[in-house]
Each structure stands twice: as structure tokens, then as C-alpha cells.
Amino acid sequence: MQTVSGNTLAPIAPSDRDAGFVSLVLLWAGGNILLATFMVGSYYAEGLGFWPMVLISISANLFAYGICAISSQRGARYGLDEVVALRPAFGMKGAYYGAFVLIFINFGWIGLLSSMTGTAAVNASEVFLGESYSFSGNYTAYAVGGGLLIPMFLVMLTPKASFYLSTVTVPVLGGFSLYILYKIVNSDHMAAVTSFEPTGAVGIAFAVETCVVWAVAWQPYLGSWNKFASSERNAYWGTFVGLAFIGILFAITGGIATLATGEIDPAVWAVKLELGLVSMIIIILGTITTSSLLLYAGVMAFMSIFPKFNYKLSTAIVALPSLIFIYDAELQNLFGIILLFVGLLAGPYWAISIVDYMVLRKGMINVEACFQDRGIYRFYKGFNIYAFVAQALGMVVWLFLGGWLSGYALLSFSLGESAFSYISATIPSMLVAAVAYVVLVRLLQPKSAQLSESYE
């Protein structure tokens, strides 16, 4: 066990798991308060129109975050970091896959958030402060400073930086977010918004897919923070309420803003709707809070693979590669690529981890064995091949149904695209992976010494 510092992979001692319901609501709400969350609703608003956009934003987010929050309970029960808690399902080395997914998602997310911070801060400062306040390298200063360097130094200072930040920033950011929605709803734009004729470019399945993938994107991060939770109940409900409330609020707000302006990028529509100053505050504070949350989880994942690296050096190694994405001009395309990456690679993987813990193990794992290379979770040379077979099946299903979203003809199947319009891609792929794994374990456990030992 380790003390409350959280700068190693050792389990958090029960006496130091002091994050209650309110703390966790603020933490996860703060994590989801970022401009990219607006883009979830913007992605499908014009295709569906006003009321369908609102209904899907509410129902799909409630469902998606309800499933997502289940993963929060492993960390809360045992005080284990997310990647360590994956070892019983995938093996001591098989969990490296989850670590790599988390780390590389981090590169994209932090780069995306920093890029949005730079663009929006430049636009807002020029509109509200005048072009005379513009200076050479202002984008770099806002993007690299606010999006990357400040969060990096805060995480180096204390692993629990996001807990401290969220108690200050979330009340402010939440109030500003409600103000944005109020101002848009009470503007002259609402008549055009409510009467907007849907383009039909995307359907309900696409909207559901977007909400589900955005929620799944949080799965790799849950254990890194809910290991501080005072109870499993607080972990579940704090995660669900914090993520779902902001997810719904921002999706609806972003959708309305897109219908009013025709713009998807929040940095653009915020200025058009004369919300630049408020949005700039949300951007800067929200990015610092969220990037700190993401970065700490990435550091823990990195240290699970390279345990000999110290905490501060690991923080720099995980943070700095995001510089590549900060200068990506195709912001909207980057957002779409990240969603595709999450749906394909993360969805089936974390679905297996959930059924392994909840269904097959009934919430019981051997904590000591999670740190033993030759323990009961070693499987075959550190890999649970049955889990990866099930994951591969889930990924094949996703590619068949959603491969067309990549834009590559090689991954596009007309029958799959037709089926997508009814059942989407990530939910079916997660179900297939989860069911396949349960069936494999049930059938093969009596014949496999590795499985029998692991599920003892």
C-alpha cells in the first residue's frame, strides 16, 4: 500500500481513499468541461435537427455514461490504478496494450485541447481586447503554455492536482456554461434553430455512436482517479453524475450553437455568438483542469510499462509528444480520428475488462497477484490469449460496421454501412467482445490450467 500521494503504482491504502461523492462529481465534471465536448452535439446537430438532437444528447449520454461508470468500481474497491486492474483480464503484459492505448489517446487529446485553447484564445483576445494585443507567437504561448506546460508542472507538483483544481474551476466553469446556453436560447437565433430543416447527412445511429465513443474515451482514465474514492458507490455515482451532466449540457449547447451559426468548431461559433470572453475563460481553465486529469492517468500507464522511470521524468515523457498535435491545422479531422481510434481499439478491450471483473470474477481479484510476474495472472508468457481473441472478434465487428467512417475504401463494406444506420458500431463490437470472452472462459476453463488458476 502507498500513502495518499499517488505517485507510484502501489495500491492506495484504504485510510487514504478520501474522495467522496462531491469531490468525484467535481473531478469528472471538470474533466468533461472542455470545448471538444461541445463538438459531440455539433457533429450530428445539422443532420438531425433541433428536437432529435436534444433527445439523443440526453438519452444516449445517460446510457453511455451509465455503462462507462461501471469501470470505476475496480479502482475504488482495491485502490488500484486502471492499468494494474486490467492485469487479471489480460495478463501482466497483456495490460500493456491498455497502457499504450491510454498513452497514445493522451497524445491526441492533450494536443487537441491545447490546439483549441490556442485558437480560441487568439480569436477571443483579438475580438475583445483588440488586435493591438496580438503578438508574434501568441498561438504558441496560449496553446503550449495553457494546454501543456501548466498542466505538466501541476501534475509534477502533485498527482492530485485535478482534485484541487476542480473544486475551484468547476463552479466557475459550470456557471459560465449555463450562461452560454441561456444566452443562446434567449437570442434571436433560437427561432431559426428550432425550425432548422435537418439535412439528413447523418442519422440517429451516428449520433448514438458519437455519444458512446466519447463516453468510452473516458474508460482508460477512470481507475487512475477512482482509486482515491472512499467507496464503490461514491465512485460509480460521482463518475456518472459528473460526466453525464456536463456531457448532456455541452452536447445540447454545442448542437444549438452549430444550428445557429453553421459552425462546428466552438472556437469559431463562440466568437460569432459574441461569447468569446466567456469561452476564453472556459477554454483556459477547462483545458488546464482536463489536461492535468488526462496527464496523470497517462503517467501511471507509462510507469506500468517502465517502472524504473521516476514520476516527474515520466510526466515530461508523456506530456511533450503532444506538441506534434498542437500544430495540426485540421482540428475537426483530428477530433474525428480520435473518436475512430477509441471506438475500434478501446471499446472491445474495456468491454472485456468489465465482464471479466463483474461477471466472471464477481468483483473479486487478487491484489498481490497483480504485481507478480509469475503469479496467477501470468497466463501464457504474460498474455491472456483468450481475451485478445475476443477483442479481435469485437474489432472485426467494428470494422465491418464502422470501417466506412475512416473514409478508406478498403475498410468500407456496403452491408456493414447499411447495418450501421440501425445498430451503430461501438455498442455491437463491445457486446460481441464481451460475450465471446465469457463463452471462451466458460468453455475452456475446465480444460485450461492457466484459466483455472487465474479464476480460482
Image (cartoon, grey):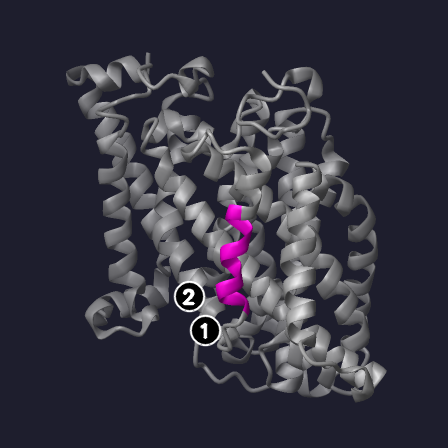
In the rendered image, residue 345, in percent from the top left (x then y), is placed at 35, 51
In the rendered image, residue 44, in percent from the top left (x then y), is placed at 51, 73
- Quadrant where the N terminus sits is top right
Q: Residue at x 35, y 29 (%)?
A: 89
Q: Is residue 322 magenta?
A: yes
Q: Residue at x 64, y 67 (%)?
A: 143
Q: Nearer the viewer, residue 215 or 311?
A: 311
Q: Is residue 102 visible?
A: yes
**Location of residue 391 (image quadrant):** top left
CA–CA distance in space, label 2 to label 1: 6 Å
Q: Nearer the viewer, residue 408 or 252?
A: 408
* Circles 2, 1 touching at the beta carbon (< 8 Å): yes
Type of residue at label 1? Asn
Type of residue at label 2? Ile
Instruction: Determine whether 315 is above or below 193 in the image.
Output: above
Q: Which residue is mark 2?
A: 337
Q: Residue at x 71, y 39 (%)?
A: 157
Label 2 crowd (10 A; few <14 / some 14-19 / many >=20): some
Q: Is residue 301 magenta?
A: no
Residue 333 is marked as 1
Q: On the rendered structure, is 413 left or right of 67?
A: left
Q: On the rendered structure, is 422 left or right of 129?
A: left
Q: Nearer the viewer, residue 398 or 82?
A: 82
**Location of residue 426 (image quadrant):** bottom left
Q: On the rendered structure, is 389 left or right of 148?
A: left
Q: Is residue 352 visible?
A: no
What stretch of residues is rendered in magenta?
317-326
